[in-house]
Amino acid sequence: MSKFKQGRIVMVTCGSPKEAKRIAQSVVGKRLAACVNIVQSPVESIYAWKGRVEKAREYLLVMKTTVTRLAELEKEVTRLHSYDVSEFIALRISEGSTSYLSWLSGSVAKTRKHGR
C-alpha cells in the first residue's frame, strides 16, 4: 500500500440512470476522472430543500480523480447536471495499491501514461 495525497474519491447523486451514464461518459472521456462507478440500484435520499424535508430516489456515482483535476471535474459535473445544487463531495484517498493509484494518476494526466 502506498500513500497518495493527490487522489480523490468524488460522490455525486443523479436523478436517473441516463443522467448518471451521460455524466460518467463525459468526465472519463475528458480525462477528468479515471473511473466512475454507477450504483445501479437507486439510493433513497432524504434531504432538506427550501425549508422542507424531501425524499428522492437517486443514482450514486463514485468517481476517482486527482486533486489537480478536481475543479475541472466539478465544473463539468455542474454543467451536465440537472439539479439546481448538485452533490459534489470529494474525499481524500489516504492509501491504496501503488499500481492502481499510478494508473489513476496517469489516466487523468493531460497525456496518457498508463493503460488498464
Image (cartoon, rainbow, N blue to C red):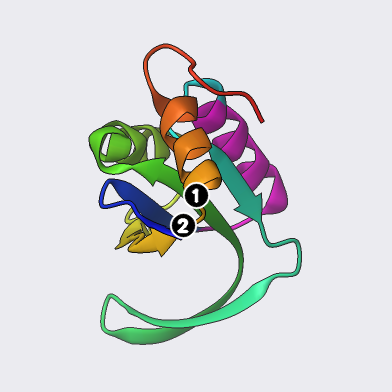
Q: Which residue is mark 1?
A: 63
Residue 20 appears at what percent x and percent y?
61, 47
Q: Is residue 93 magenta?
A: no
Q: Nearer the viewer, residue 29 or 67?
A: 67
Among the 4 quarters of the image, the one containing residue 67: top left
Circle 1 packing at 10 Å, graded few (<14), some (14-19), many (20+), is: many
Q: Is residue 12 left or right of residue 16?
A: left
The amino acid marked with disc number 2 is Val
Choose between 5 and 63: the one closer to the eye.
5
Counting residues from the start of the chain, the first of labels 1 and 2 encountered is 2
Q: Residue at x 42, y 56 (%)?
A: 9
Kindly identify the amino acid type of the residue bearing the numbered disc 1: Met
Q: Residue at x 41, y 55 (%)?
A: 10
Dot 2 surroundings within 10 Å: few (below 14), some, or many (20 or more)? many
Q: Please, is residue 37 above or below residue 31 in the view?
A: below
Query: In x, y percent, where is residue 28?
Result: 55, 30
Q: Quarter of the image holding residue 78?
A: top left
State the quadrant of the C terminus.
top right
**Vertically, is 58 above or below 106?**
below
Residue 12's label in the rendered image is 2
